[in-house]
Each structure stands twice: as C-alpha cells, then as structure tokens.
C-alpha cells in the first residue's frame, strides 16, 4: 500500500511543524521529503488525539506504527518512511532521540524486479504520446531521467552541441551529466523555439519570471526573467508567488505527464503495468544489453552505489537473454509431436 492511499490530513500551521520545516530546509531536504515527513507527524498527532509529541514517546510511536501495519495494511516501505519521519522529529526537532529497539521489529522490504519494456514496446508507447509529452517520454527513455529531473530542467541544462543534459540537484542533491539522444535533438530544437516565443510574449506583458533555487534570486536580481533560467517544459498557466504576489511560470506538473503515459500504455496494447519510471528502467536495461559497462550505466543513472544498478542484471537473466533453458538442449526430441493416450 502506498502513501497516496492514506490521504494526508490538513496540516495545521503549528509552531512544531514550522520548526520541523525550518530544520529540514537547513538540512537541504527536498520539498517532497519535507511534505511527506510533516504529513506523518500530523497523522501521528491526530492518532493520539492531538496530544503534543513531547507528551508521547517510543511506546506511542510503536503503537502508531503497529496500527499502520495491522489496521491500514501499509507496505514495508511506507512504514519505513513513517518511522523515519518520527525518528527525525524526536531527534532533530525535540531533542529526544527515540529508543525503538525491541519495540518495532525491522520490516522486510521485498526485492522487486523492475518492469522493463523491450524496444518494440517502447516504440509503441512513445508512438501514442503526442506533442510535448512525446518529447518528455523520449528523454525519459533516451537519457534515463526520473520524471521530476526531466520536468525541472532549465534551458541552460541542455547542450545541443555536445548532446548532454546536466541534471542539477537530482535525487540525493547530486548533480550529474547524462546523454542527450540524437533522436530527440530536432524535436528539442523545435520545442525551444516555441518556448522562446512563449517567454518573449510573457516578458512583453510584464511577467515571464520563474523561481530560482536557494538565494540566487538575491544574488542575481534579474536572473529569474533571463532565458537560460527558464523551465525547459513550462506550464501554460501562471501562478501568483505567495510572498511577492508576482505572476510566475512553473514547470509542467508531473500528474499531467503521468496521465498521458498511462493512456499511451493502455492504447498501445502493451500488456505490462508501465509508467514513466519504466522508461528509465528500460534505458538502463537496454544499455546493459548493448554491452555497456555497469559503472557507466551507474553514472548515467545517478546511483550512489553500483548495487542499486545491479538490479538490472537480474532483468537481463530473465526471458532467456542470459540463461539457456535445459529443455532447449533436448533439441529435436521436443520437435516430435507428443502422443497422448485416449
């Protein structure tokens, strides 16, 4: 069961949550991790009838985690995330480290082999994606990008001369360089022309700014309206900045791409449960099938440890790619028609 099946309650604007957000931002945690952790803190507090976490402790945390497992049936990964959020709250915010040894057994997370599409299936799915969604799908497969890494690309991150894409602040706050497929170069060049027209039109209307990471907005006051800092995949609508009220443009929302991908998989007739991330899995698997070194694939994917990349070698051994079935050695014997008694 995923976190999304447990609807996050509305988070009150409490001093505790504000302090937790401040700590996490100082620790350079991602916005998604911040939202997930604070959401679990709110669920924990509401489970214990709005008692302050200072009045609670390891026993109450264990009770909450037990309820998640037994009553809500959450997956092992979801339970791990909930526990990590509460451990962070007590250690970093409240200064009261939890002692859960003996209270919470270590969950066993199942090892799952990723779904991978073959080249024909990838072509069928990409063929059903239209417009900007087709270009995004091509980059997910051709560059091995995660969806959010692709959607948060800036104009300056794409090099059409060296055929490179620079991923900045990827998972784990790591930068990396991956390849830009030549098959996407022409489509990307046409896309950049359309994005430039959209940006120029917005500037003439007095808008055309984007949010900048960290304190760059203060260091470079006009960078938010410059062309290199614009999103590669901008949203159509503008939004009002909460602090300044200024109209800005955000990048495409991931849900729009996910819906388009789900529809493309359905229409293509591919009988697999594929998603945007499946294209990244297919990128890695197909590179290994082509004989590229696993360390090279690790660098392109941005994996911290090669053991993470090793999961794709398990996919290579499936379906007869790496292992020959002993039944195939029987050869001609199997070609004879079987005789079944009446």
Image: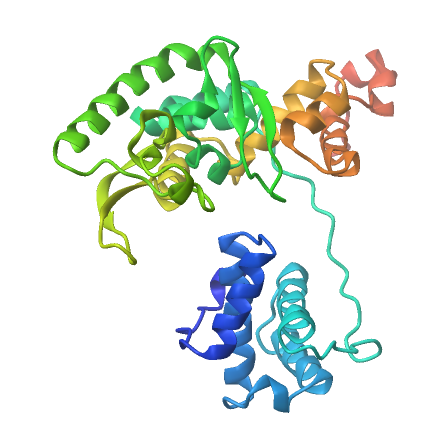
Instruction: Give me the residue at 44% from left, 79% from top.
Output: 14
Residue 36 image offset from top left, x and y in percent: 52, 62
Q: Is 172 displayed left or right of 199 in the figure?
A: right
Task: Note whether residue 325 is visible.
Answer: yes
Q: Is residue 188 above or below residue 44?
A: above
Instruction: Give me the residue at 43% from left, 41% from top.
Output: 216
Q: Is 19 displayed left or right of 248 in the figure?
A: right
The N terminus sits in image quarter: bottom right
Residue 329 image offset from top left, x and y in percent: 87, 17
Instruction: Give me the residue at 72% from left, 38% from top.
Output: 304
Q: Is 304 displayed left or right of 163 in the figure?
A: right
Q: Is residue 43 above or below residue 178?
A: below
Q: Is residue 73 above or below residue 242?
A: below
Between residues 222 and 112, which one lies in front from this camera angle? 222
Residue 81 image offset from top left, x and y in percent: 63, 63
Between residues 231 and 143, which one lies in front from this camera angle? 231
Q: Quadrant of residue 71?
A: bottom right
């Amino acid at each position: 069961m995923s976190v999304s099946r447990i609807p996050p309650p509305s988070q009150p604007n409490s001093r505790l949550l504000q302090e937790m957000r401040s700590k996490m931002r100082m620790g350079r945690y991602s916005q998604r991790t911040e939202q997930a952790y604070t959401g679990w803190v709110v669920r924990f507090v509401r489970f214990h009838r709005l008692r302050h976490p200072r009045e609670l402790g390891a026993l109450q945390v264990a009770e909450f985690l037990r309820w998640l497992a037994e009553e809500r049936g959450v997956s092992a990964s979801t339970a791990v995330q909930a526990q990590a959020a509460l451990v962070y709250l007590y250690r970093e915010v409240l200064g009261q480290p939890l002692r859960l040894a003996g209270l919470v057994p270590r969950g066993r997370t199942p090892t799952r082999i990723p779904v991978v599409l073959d080249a024909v299936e990838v072509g069928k799915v990409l063929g059903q994606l239209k417009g900007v969604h087709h270009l995004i799908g091509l980059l997910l497969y051709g560059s091995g990008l995660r969806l959010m890494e692709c959607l948060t690309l800036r104009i300056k991150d794409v090099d059409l001369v060296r055929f490179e894409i620079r991923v900045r602040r990827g998972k784990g706050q790591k930068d990396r360089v991956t390849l830009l497929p030549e098959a996407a170069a022409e489509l990307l060049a046409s896309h950049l022309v359309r994005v430039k027209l959209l940006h120029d039109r917005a500037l003439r209307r007095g808008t055309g700014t984007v949010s900048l990471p960290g304190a760059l907005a203060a260091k470079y006051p006009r960078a938010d309206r410059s062309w290199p800092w614009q999103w590669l995949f901008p949203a159509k609508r503008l939004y009002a900045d909460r602090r300044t009220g200024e109209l800005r443009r955000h990048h495409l929302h991931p849900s729009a791409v996910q819906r388009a991908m789900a529809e493309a998989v359905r229409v293509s007739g591919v009988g697999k449960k594929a998603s945007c991330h499946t294209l990244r899995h297919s990128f890695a698997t197909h590179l290994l099938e082509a004989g590229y070194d696993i360390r090279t694939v690790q660098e392109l994917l941005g994996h911290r440890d090669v053991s993470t990349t090793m999961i794709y070698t398990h996919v290579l051994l499936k379906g007869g790619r790496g292992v020959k079935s002993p039944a195939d050695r029987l050869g001609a014997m199997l070609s004879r028609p079987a005789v079944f008694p009446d």
